[in-house]
Amino acid sequence: MMKMTVSARAALLPLALVLAAHSAGAAAQTPAPPKPAATGDTVRLTLLHLNDVYQFQPTSQNRGGLSRVATLRQQALKESPNVLTLMAGDTLSPSVESSAEVEGEALKGRQMIDAWNALGVDYAVVGNHEFDFGDDVLRARLQQSRFPWLGANVMSVKSGQVFDGMKAWDVRDVGGVKVGIFGVVLPETQHSSRPGPDTRITPYCDAAKRAVDEVRAAGAQLVVALTHLAVEQDRELAKCVRVDVIIGGHDHDRVEETVAGTPIFKLDEDAVDLGQLTLDLDARTGAVKKLAWKVVPITAKVPDDAAFNAKMQPYAPLLATLAERIGRSPVALDARSAQNRLGETNLGSFLADTFREATGADVALVNGGAVRADRVLPAGTMTRRELYSLMPYRNELVMLEVTGTTLRAALENGVSLSSVDGKPPGRFPQVSGLRFTYDLRKPPGERVTRVEVRGRTLDETAVYRLATLSFIASGNDGYTMFKELPVSRGLPSPWDALAGAFSTGKPMPRAKPQGRIALRGAPRGGLRAPPTMK
Ligand SMILES: [Zn+2]
């Protein structure tokens, strides 16, 4: 890999000419009409790009905000009509807004499509998170979009075509140059998100080769790959297919490098910056004569766009509700995903304590996967937004009566997938009213070596009242031992129970884990969290 510097950009040019010769060859089969020579023999194309944008308003650090981006886009369009605005995937989920209900219906990314429509996007590629709500919701979002979504490797098994409502590629005339663009998404999406049984994410290199052949045959002189891949996969793509530029996403990191002569550009998440790629193209052949990439910080110095704000006004009450103060936490809360799936955390214990007290149960169990913010929340004011970010999923709080044997089986399930590597399991149990020890040297199903309920050894025949989330009680994440048991409902919602605790200080979160869960047989240095999924 080569980090691209200003001087290295010049080195790209000879290769760009080689690529252009290649493209001209394909275009020669269908002779292009003479190009308008408005700017002499050069056409300047500007690509504005963003990736992994989960909210349309600025971040808590007051960076980003699609209203500000709209201002910059309008400015660019005033200077030249040859501007394409590209979105490189991941926007429908996850976010507090996407889990929120407006008029009785969960938004599930609807607000982001409204925002992209208001901004004016030319093309978007689907990211892995576009599938988080399943195919039907995605289809509805595609229909709602006033711009094409690309997904050359997102196939319907039944039709043998790309996913209904997506395009593999498109060709657009920009200032007299035919620009071809296609999109691909990382294959891991098949399992990390929730595409339906009819949807297959196929190998991206094969799909890209096919798309490039097709856009060239359709007359494209310049080819842009709009990708949602991990950066190693973008490097692979640069080697397996010839394109002029790769604009990507997914990593949540700025990338500026050249692989096999192809420049790759990506940005951090949430539109904290806007990418601006300026391409000076030969007006006749579309060959890249000069390329310059600039990162424009999106800060409060960029004014809002009034038209954008007017279109997003219907969401103002929701944003106001999310900003509401519900109470405070005297300590920082560990809401990191991996930590909540690998062992006891102060937040996991606080959630379980809150649910146990709100229901009057003997014990409580919360799956680590229910904790979502994936960061440490600082001590101090707690807003509704922070509460929802901790637990974005709509769950009920339920209580069921379980025997000691069933409780032990539940704990065994909770630690059955805990291992030294791989993905920290969402089923890991955060607990209240009990303590337990597990031994990773033993096989799954025999790992729990000691359980105490309120200071006494677990009685296998006793009946305990257990508070948990409806997700677990209905048998998900391997908790099938609960599936057939009757549950008490009509309890406060998990959100109401937590809001109550934050406003009254009862129960109170502790600064550190309390030693409720002990681990034997851990590798030297303890269990390690892999890098989180984007
Ligand atoms: Zn992603």
Image (cartoon, rainbow, N blue to C red):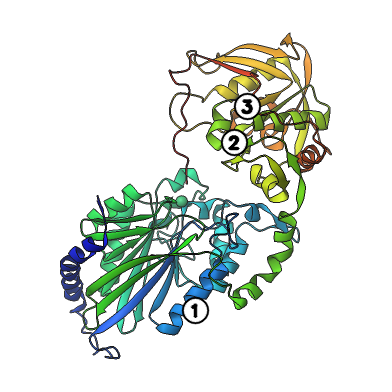
The reply to whether the residue tagged 2 has its Cβ within 8 angstroms of ligand 1 is no
Looking at the image, can residue 242 be seen?
Answer: no
Left or right: 414 as drawn, with respect to 458: left
Disc 2 versus disc 1: distance between alpha carbons? 42 Å
Q: Secondary structure at mark 2?
A: helix
Q: Amino acid at mark 1?
A: Gln
Disc 1 packing (10 Å; few <14; some 14–19; many ≥20): some
Circle 3 Cα neighbour tier, 10 Å, few/some/many (<14 / 14–19 / ≥20): many
Q: Which residue is mark 2?
A: 369
- Expressed as whole percent of the image width and height from the top left, the position of residue 534 reads 47, 47
Confirm or deny contact between disc 2 and disc 1 (CB under 8 A). no
**Which residue corresponds to the image point at 71% horizontal and 18% vertical from the top-left?**
434
Q: Which residue is mark 3?
A: 429
Q: Nearer the viewer, residue 137 or 164?
A: 137
For the residue carrying disc 2, how many other residues have a C-alpha within 10 Å: few (<14), some (14-19), or many (20+)? some
Q: Quadrant of residue 362?
A: top right
Of badges 3 and 1, nearer the viewer stands 1
Q: Is mark 1 within 8 Å of ligand 1?
A: no
Image mark for residue 74: 1
Label whose residue precedes the other's in the sequence (3 or 2): 2
Kind of residue at badge 2: Gly
Residue displayed at 18% across by 79% down: 28
Label 3 amino acid? Pro
Q: Position of residue 6 (x, y in %)?
A: 26, 63
Residue 210 showing in the rendered view: yes
Q: Is residue 173 left or right of residue 123?
A: left
Q: Secondary structure at mark 1?
A: helix
